[in-house]
Amino acid sequence: MKKVENMTVLSNELIARKIYKCVLSGQLVNEITEPGQFVHVKVSGGTEPTLRRPISICEIDRAQESLTMIYRVEGKGTKLLSEKRDGETVDVLGPLGNGFPIEGLKPNAHCLLVGGGIGVPPLYELAKQLVSKGHNVTTVIGFRSTDDVFLEKEFAILGDTYVVTEDGTSGEQGFVTDIIKKYQLSCDRYYACGPRMMLRALETMMPENGYLSLEERMGCGIGACLACVCDTQDKVSYRKVCTDGPVFPVGEVVV
Amino acid sequence: MTKCHVSLPGLDMKNPIMPASGCFGFGKEYSEFYDLSTLGAICVKAVTPSVRKGNPTPRVAETDGGMLNAIGLQNPGLDRVMEHELRWLESFDVPVIVNIAGNTVEEYMHVAKTVSKAKSVNAVELNISCPNVKEGGITFGTDPHVAKELTSRVKDVCEVPVYVKLSPNVTDIVSIAKAVEKGGADGLSMINTLLGMRLDLKTGKPIIANETGGLSGAAIKPVAVRMIHGVSQEVSIPIIGMGGVTSADDALELILAGASAVAVGTQNFVDPYACPTIINDLEKKLEEYDVEHITELVGRSWKPSLHLTNR
């Protein structure tokens, strides 16, 4: 069930260029049902900034009732969030949206996880859950440059992990799709989250058996304001990214 | 009857607080958070004769103290709303206002006539002020004669009271208000959003795909207060005030300006519990200010009387 809760900041630290990792504790964690769901965070008590910030859930720890968000400081909202210190509280609405489905896979299935930039975090909880169910995970994560890379070691513990940077300063040079082609990475199902360009390229290369997580400017996060809609591929109707998504089967919506 | 009970044409309200049209869908999303029957009323999203897809994305952009939106009246169309949304709302003990829009006078009349027959509907709100659609909407709300004519034609066929939602994007809102009153409006809703624009510094282009959008949120409250204050002195029909209400104090300010009830818009997006929180706080404020009944405060800003705390 969705709820609004003042969650307590356990830690909030810089882990890469403009990238922060924030661990929050609260009962809201018990409501999370799928990896890939997100929270909508009110970063200040007043009207500035007005709207909440949608942030993906990177990791959950039910025993400790904590969740980890990894976010990039882009504007004044995320800047304010980055200034929250241990022990302070943050107003969180969540969990929101439908995440990555992990059911219906054959035993010991091979899953390919593809992330770009700030789209990488929600794949981490997914990877953990897939591995705990006995599946095999290969991860390809792409960044602009070496200063932007994060979660590389964490993914490497869970399975084969490829890092790719646009300037070649970490891992291999190029885009995530170059790695998939080069190593002919095949899978029973793939999951992806990242920039639209990346998702489009992936969809063209692998039009089946995939799930894509989208991002869109959002108002309410709960399906009422209709700000974050996207076209279906038949162009007849819309889907709401916040409540129908953010994860959609490949081929359902226009990315 | 409590301190907060208010009675407006067609609307017997437990309290003066309702969600504003377009900021609450048809109530389903918010019913996951609280019992909709606690609201004074519900004003649902604009209904048009057939399905409307709305505008391309991006549809929202944040601004200092507010947001711009250009949703473009996306809705499932009259038939679907009648069969599903309005029927679903019957299970709640709360008056329902349906915001209606169309491209022509006939379309407005058709929607008004049809929805006014629904069991759950207590009033309609004529949307003649949506700034985000090319046809209909604001084109009906900027000329007093056109606004009056539309109001009158809708009144002829509508079986429930008609509130007309006014646009702030006009030079003289009082003349429009007076015109729709003459056209037979039972009440006014004001204000709709203010037309605005934001540019992306990286691209130099408008952030919203529609280029312009309607500004809402805390930033527009002074405009709402000014316009309600001006109009309420010139008309004798009640006003549902809206524009930048985030708290019980904001609601009281609009009531002091001349509103008989208050709608909450953007704040619902920020806090899904915005309406019930304001309702609770309002009761407390009236106790605090030693006000016997909320109607005492309506228009007090221009009526000769004492300050709140000096009673």
Image (cartoon, coloured by chain):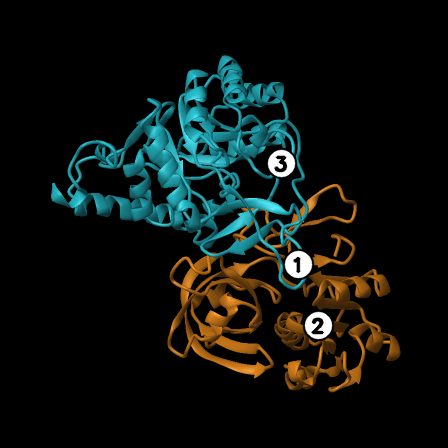
Q: Do we see residue B35 in this rendering?
A: no
Residue toward you, A52 or B173 = B173
* Mark 2 lies on residue: A116
Q: Colour of chain B?
A: cyan
Q: Which tag, 3 or 1, sits closer to the chain's start?
A: 3
Q: Quadrant of the C terminus of chain A?
A: bottom right
Residue toward you, B100 or B145 = B145
Q: Is residue A126 left or right of residue A43?
A: right
* Chain letter belonging to callout 1: B
Q: Is residue A205 above or below residue B123?
A: below
Look at label 1 and name its amino acid. Gly
Q: Quadrant of residue B72?
A: top right
Proximity of marks 3 and 1: CB atoms separated by less than 8 Å: no
Name the spot of residue A221 as percent of width and height, x first.
54, 54
Q: Is residue B210 left or right of residue B247?
A: right
* Mark 1 lies on residue: B204
Q: Which chain is orange?
A: A
Q: Do we see residue A55 in this rendering?
A: yes
Q: Secondary structure at mark 1?
A: loop
Residue at 33%, 36% in the rendered image: B16
* Mark 3 lies on residue: B133
Q: Which mark is residue A29?
A: none
Q: Is residue B267 above or below residue A33?
A: above
Q: Alpha-carbon distance for marks 3 and 1?
A: 24 Å
Proximity of marks 2 and 3: CB atoms separated by less than 8 Å: no
Look at label 2 and name its amino acid. Gly
Residue toward you, B96 or B257 = B257
Name the spot of residue A130 as percent of width and height, x first.
67, 73
Q: Nearer the viewer, mark 2 or mark 3?
A: 3
Q: Is residue B153 left or right of residue A250?
A: left
Look at label 3 and name its amino acid. Val
